[in-house]
Image (cartoon, helix red, strand yellow):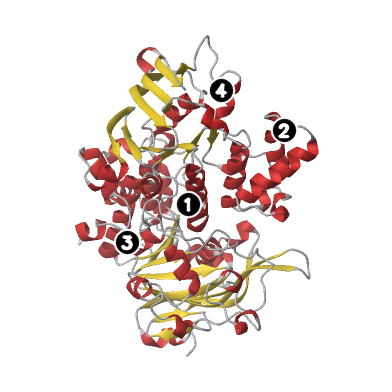
Amino acid sequence: MSASAETSSSANVLVEIRDLVIGIQRTRSDRLIIVDSANFDIKRAEILGLVGESGSGKTMVCRSLIGTLKRRSASIFGGSIVFDGMDLATIDERKWRTVRGNRIGYVPQSALTGPNPVMTVGKQIAEAVRRNRRRSDKNVRGRVMELLDLVHIRRPEIVYDQYPFQLSGGMRQRVMIAAAIAQDPDIVVADEPTTGLDVTVQAEIMKLLREIRSEFNMSVVLVSHDLALIDEVCDRLVVMHAGTCVEVGSVSDVAREPLHPYTIALNRSRIDIATPGAPLVTIKGNPPAVGEWPAGCRFAERCDFVQQDCTIGPNPPLLEVRKGHWSACLHADALGGSGE
Amino acid sequence: MPTPWEAVVSEALIEARDVSVTFGSGSRAVRAVKNVSLHVDQGEAVGIVGESGSGKSTLARVLAGLQRPDSGEVLFAEESIYQRGKAYRGDKRRLVQMVFQDPYGSLNPRISALAAVAEAVRIHGAGTRAEATSQSLKLLAQMGISERDAGKKPRQLSGGQRQRVSVARALSAQPAVLLADEPTSAIDQSAQAQLLNLFRGLLDEGLSIALVSHDLGVIRYLTQRVYVMKDGEFVEEGATLDVFDNPQQEYTKKLIASIPGQDLRKAQS
C-alpha cells in the first residue's frame, strides 16, 4: 500500500502532503534538493510532532506550510499540499495572504527575536487581529485583551503597552502564540517553540498548546528534536531524516514498535531514559549532507540493521506497514519490536 | 606519564566561599549571586541547575576567573585566584578551561577546526608547527572529528561537531577542570549523546567537570552532585540522584516535574 492510502482511511484529514519536493534553484540548471519526499497528513485537532536532526528538512516543510520558502530562496519543485481544496504547493502570493495567518498560524523558533522589538505587544497582536477583518479600534483592543487572556498573560492591560524586551522569554512566546491564533486558524505551526527556554517555561507553553488544541479544535504541528517532549504532548509524529519522512504513526505505536532503524537509534540515544553514568548509545556517523545523498536508503551507512539491498536503487518509499503506521525501511517487518 | 592534574594534591580543586556578585549600583543594583559556596572535587562532575536569570552563568564565570566577585573567595587548589586583581595567574590559568553554550559564537568562522585547535595547542606550548598540528589532529580524533572534517570551517561542521571542536580546544591546555556552560543546549539529541559520552570518558581519566545547565536530563545523567540555584542562591544541594528522586524544596520539585516524559500528561488529563 502506498502512502496515499492514508487519505481514504479518515475523513478528518485537514492537510495532505504528498511527495513534496523542496529545493533551491542555484543556477538555471543546478538545483539543490533539500526535501525530496515529504509524505504525511495533518488531521483536525491533533498535535503532530515533526522530529529529525538539523538539516533533515523539518524547518523547510514548516515553511512550505506557511508559504515563506521564498524568504529562504527555496521553492517547491514537486508534490502537493492539499488543504481545503487548495494545493498550497502551487497557489500564488495573493492567495497565500488569505491562508497565512488566517487559516494557518505560525509560532517562530525564537521567542527572543520573533517579536518586533520597537512595537508594543498590544500593537503587534492588534496587527494580527486587524489583518483583513475590518474592526473598529475599540473592538481590536478588546480582542487583543481576550487573546492575551487566552494565553494566560496576567495583567494584560499593562502588558499591552509593554515592549518585547520588557518581557521574559516565556511571556514573549505566549505573545507570539496569541498573535498566531488571532484569526482562529485551523492549524498552528510551531517550529521549536521552546528552544532556549527553561524546562518550567517549556512545560507551560506545551500546556498552552494543548489547551488551544482542545478549546478551539486547532491542529498543532510541533517541530522539535526532543523525543521526550514529542512523546509527552503529541498524538502522532513524523520522523524526518535527510530530506525524507522515514516513519509516520501515532506516538504510542511508534514508542511500542518503531518501524525504522533511525527512530530506534533516536530512541536509544535518549538521555531521559538512560541510566546515569552508563554509556549512551549514539548514532554512528553524521547524516548525509544535503546534495550528497547516497543511493538507496540514506540511513543505510549509519544503520545497525543494514542489508545488501539497502544501498542500491531509489530512496525507499514510505509504506503503511501496520494500520496507521508508515515506514520507509525496506526491512520494516523484520524490525518489529526491536525498539524495546 | 602522569596526567597534569595529578600534580594537584588537594581534594577540592575549586572552591567558592561565600561568593557574591552584584551588577550595577544604587537602586538599580542586581545581586546576581548571593553568598554562594560550592566545591568541585577532583575527578568529580558537579551540576549547577536553575532557570534563566538564576545566576548560574555568572557563577560559572566567577569560577573560570572571568568575573571578579564583590565578596567572598574563590580557591583553586587552596589558593585564592582573585589576588591583586589577577585571576588564575600563570600556570593556574591553563588548568581551568571553559566551554560555552554556542559553539558557533566561540569559534573563529574563518579558520578551520584544525587551525583553531592548533592555535590553542601552540599557546599552551607545543613546540613546532608540525608538532602542534599532529597533537591537534590527535585531540580532534579523540573528539570523534576525522582528519577530513578537521580541515573544515565551523560553518561546514554540524552543531555537535563544532561543540566537540570547542572541547578539543579547551582540552589542548590539559586542564584539571572543565567548566561547561550549557554545552548541549544548542545541539541535536544524537550529538548530545556523543558529547556526553565524551565527557564521561574525560571524567574516567580524572578530569573534573562543572556543568551548568537548565537541562535536568543532562545533569541527572552526568553529575554526581548537584546545586540547585534560584535567584542567585543555592536552594538545594546534594547527591544528584537523591535530589532528583527525593527533592526537598518546592522549587526543585517544580523543576523536576517539568522534565518532559514524566507526568505532565497525567496532571492534565
Q: Secondary structure at mark 1?
A: loop
Quadrant in which residue A325 is drawn: bottom left
Residue type beneath disc 1: Gln
Q: Chain of mark 1?
A: A
How dense is the environment of label 4, judged by Cα within 10 Å: few (below 14), some, or many (20 and up)? some
Which one is in front in this view, the residue at disc 2 or the one at disc 3?
2
Residue at x 22% of width, y 42% of height: B247
Q: Secondary structure at mark 3?
A: helix
Q: Chain of mark 2?
A: B
Q: Is residue A299 visible?
A: yes
Residue at x 27% of width, y 59% of height: A211
Query: Label 2, label 3: how many angstroms apart (C-alpha)?
Result: 50 Å
Q: Earlier in the sequence, mark 2 or mark 4?
A: 4
Work out whether B133 lies above or below A76.
above
Q: Secondary structure at mark 2?
A: loop
Q: Secondary structure at mark 4?
A: helix
Is A84 left or right of A145, judged from the image as shown?
Answer: right
Q: Earlier in the sequence, mark 3 or mark 1?
A: 1
Point out residue A33 in the picture as x, y percentages from the top left corner: 66, 69
| Residue A232's disc number | 3
Where does label 4 land, which residue? B92
Q: Who is closer to the viewer here, B93 or B215?
A: B93
Where does label 1 land, which residue? A109
Where does label 2 land, which residue? B126
| Extreme residue toward the bottom, this view | A1
Q: Who is closer to the viewer here, A31 or A334?
A: A334
Residue type beneath disc 3: Glu
